[in-house]
Structures are given as structure tokens and as C-alpha cells.
Amino acid sequence: MNFLKRAILAVTRRKGKSVIMFVIFAAIANMVLAGLAIQHATEYASVLARQKLGGQLTLRYDMQSAMQKARTAGEQRPRIQSEPVTEEMGKMIAGQKSISGYNYIVNANGLAQGFTAVTAEETQQENTGSDNQPQGRGGFESGGNFVIPDVTVTGVSSSKLVDSFSNGEAKMINGRAITPTDADKKVALIEKNLAEQNTLKVGSKIKVQAARSEDAVEYSIVGIYETSGSSSSTGQGMRNLPFTEPYNRIFTDYKSAIPLKTVTTDTGIESGGIDQAVFFVDDPKNIETVQADAKSMKIDWGKFTLDANDQAYKQMMGPIENVASFSMTVVYIVAIAGAVILALVLMLSVKERMYETGVLLSMGEGKLKIIAQYVAEVLVIAVVAFSLSVFTGKFIAQGVGNTLLQREITVVQQEGNNNPAGPGGGFQGMRGGWFGGQSQNSYQAIDSLNVQITASEVEQMLAAGLLILIAGTILPAGTVMRFKPKTMLTKAA
């Protein structure tokens, strides 16, 4: 009788054992396929994350390094004067092929001249004198005393590249955005509430005075935007001050914002310069290359620093990478455990069939054909189990992958809650909120995986499954085949 025919008859007659083998194969196939599919889905998700987030590098004066040098030099109360970023520095770094765009940022604040800032009710009550006229609007009074400013001015080379616009917190509702061609044209974007309160529209003029000098700049409004942001002031003493309100944030071209940015020097109060240049990298994985290339440029890296602003990418990719690593671990564990379990089951089955094996050998059947029969029996069951797993594996992988990802996201969120200030603490929040600095984008984490079973995963699953079942069949069969037919019949009797 042909060994293939004997294999089919053996499978149909031993229904109980065939069902057990089917369950084992189906479990192994589904878990291996799920692991491979999750791995593929995480790779795809990482590509989407990189495309969605990009990467940022920020060139700024290294204040921390300057403070450390001053203390090392023995200064007890060092007074550090930051140096502005120059356009030459920005153009050198922006010339790299991985840079997709860049934005100059100038952070200033000042006095509204000829219009009024949007003020919270609590602030109006606290800053209103006996004559019910607002007090402390900012600037210099006749006695030369400094008072609090009431508007924030953010100078940019491109408003579209500002975080609040790119992440949807702010959106244009009228007019146009600020572009690099607007440099030194004295153009401005104002918030909708500020525009409505002062009956301003596109084409209107507004004047802003520097907070620490009498210098003023008149701007032409080219656009009106709407923000969903809220005041970022956290200190009790700074609560509800006008210049911390997002409605009082005015975006201008960066060159015309510089006269409003005043700094104190040894010779008095002078105009500042560009606070930072933000570079957008086409892919976060190229950030280190850009940083390394920039180090060879003629920039005083003892004073300036080029920081990677890829925290959002790392936070988003952390859970995905953990899931990918776990999925591959599952594949290895299932493959090894499956091979061991299968080998044990087959070993028991082969030993139980020792009499049958002895008879076949006595009848002149070759050992290779007998082993081929056992392999064929397993293959018949495996083909059915593997075929079914192609349909069920996707659902298992989708459920397992999303559950693991949600668990990883929860862990990251809990860690974030334990350290809410993040790198830089409150200072970074102050720069990003009050003075309009370029801060880390806020993006929604990828909380689900799009799992698809492709031909690649099926091929890998079949290769792994065949390797497991062939090894699991030949090894135990080989231990029995070393006996002679007479010995087999005697042991089976």
C-alpha cells in the first residue's frame, strides 16, 4: 500500500489524535502569524508616525552652558546676556538636504497703542483704579517705572510653520498667513477676539510699543486667526495678566518684531535679535546626521546649541516599538514551545505505533517511507490548520496588537503624569506660552494598529510551521527507527 494512502487512512481513523494535532497546529500557526502581522503593522505605523511628526531642530543661544561657565569662573551671581541667532547661521544649517523648511522666531511683548488688549474679568477688577480706568497696561510711566505689558508679539518667517498653526490649535479664518517674503514689511496676524473687540479687520493698522522703551512699530493686518488655546500662566502672581492671554498674541514678520524685543546690556537697553531658528527635518531618523554635519559649520558651538525637538516622536514610537519587540518575542517563544510540544506528542504517538512500525519493517517497508508516512500525516493536518489560520490570524493579531498598544500607551501616560513638567520644566512652558516660542508639537498618539495579513507573513508562517512539524516528526521517529523489527514487536507486545 502506498505510504500516502496509509497516511490519509491513519488521520481519518485516529480522529481524537487528529483533532489534538489540529488544535496544536492551529494555535502555533495563529500565534506565529499574529506575531509576524503585528511586527509588520508596527513597522508601517512607525513610517506613518515619522511622516506625521517629522523632526525639529532648534538653534538657540546655550544659556545653560553660559551659566555653568560663569559659575566655574567664580561668579556668584552671574549676569548672562544671550546672543541672537543670525540669519547666516540659519542659512548654513538650512542648506542641508534633509531640511525641509525652517522658521525664525523672535519673542517680544509690548503695549497696545490705539487699541485695547483682551482682558479677563478678574484682571480688570484687580487692575482697575478708583476712576475705573485700567492701570498697569505696560511700558514706562512718567516716573520711569516699568509696568506690565499687555500683548505678546511673536515674530516669524512663516506662520504656517508655527506649532499652534501646524497642530490645529490655531487656524486662519480671514486673510492670509505670513510668509518669508513678508520679512521687514511690518505685517501682522491678530486673534479673532482681539479683532472683534477693537473692530479691526484685514487691512487695518495697529501700533505696538516696546515694553521697555518708547520704540513702536505700526503693523498692517494681513490675516485674522482663531485659537483654541488657553492662558499658559501657572504662577499665582501671573494669573490672568493680559500678555499671557492667547487672544493677545500677535504674529508679525520676524524682522519687524526685533525693534520690540529689548534687552538690558552694560550700555543700557538695546534691541534684541532672533531668539531661535527652528529647522524641520524630513525624517526624525535623519536628526543625528543633520546635527553631526552642523558641527563642522562655522558656528560658535561653545555659545550656541542645536537641540533635537523629537520628544513627541519618541513618546509616540515608544509604545509601538515595545509592542513590536514583544510580538517578535512571542513568535520565538511560540515556535520553540510549539516544536517541543509537538515533538512530545509525536513521540508518544510513534511509540504507541511501535507494533505497526515493526510490522511494516518486517514486511520490507523502508524506514524512509515509514518516516515519510508520519510526516505526511502531520502535513495533512497542518495544511488544514494553516489554511484556517490565514483567516483567523488577522482578527487575533488585531485584537492582541491593539490591547498591547493600549497598555503601553497607558504606561507612558502614567509616567508622563508623574513628570508633568517634562524636560526643561516650567521654563519651557513659559517660553512656549507667554512669549510664543516654538514648542514641541502636540499630536494624538497612535492608539491602534492596522493589521493586515500579507503574502509575506503567510510565507514566513508556512516556513516556520513546516520547519517545526518536520523537526517534530523526524526526531521522535528517528529514535524509534534505530530498533530492529524484532525488538519493536517485542517491546510492543
Image (cartoon, grey):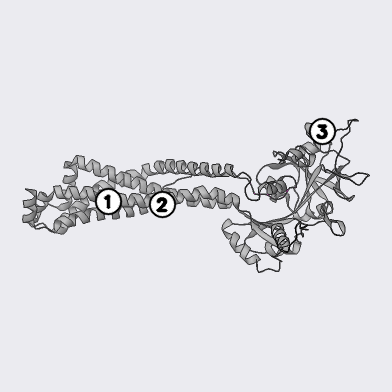
What residue is rendered at 36% in x and 49% in y? 32
Q: Position of residue 268 (x, y in %)?
A: 87, 57
Observer-nearest of 488 and 1: 488
* Picture disc at residue 328: 2
Mark 1 burial class by Cα count in 10 Å: few <14, some 14-19, many 20+: some
Of the image marks 1 and 3, the number of the one nearer the N terminus: 3
Observer-nearest of 76 and 53: 76
Q: Amino acid at mark 1?
A: Val
Mark 3 burial class by Cα count in 10 Å: few <14, some 14-19, many 20+: few
Q: Is residue 475 left or right of residue 36?
A: left
Q: Main secondary structure of the magenta part?
A: loop
Return the residue at label 1. 340
Residue 389 vertical placement versus 197 (above, below)? below
Q: Is residue 76 left or right of residue 296?
A: right
Q: Residue 61: in sight, yes or no?
A: no
Q: Position of residue 36 (x, y in %)?
A: 40, 50
Asked whether the beta carbons under mark 1 and mark 2 sit within 8 Å of each other, the answer is no
What residue is rendered at 22% in x and 47% in y? 345
Q: Amino acid at mark 2?
A: Met
Residue 128 vertical placement versus 469 (above, below)? above
| SS state under label 2 | helix
Mark 2 burial class by Cα count in 10 Å: few <14, some 14-19, many 20+: some
The mark total stands at 3
Return the residue at label 3. 126
Mark 1 to mark 2: distance in Å? Answer: 18 Å
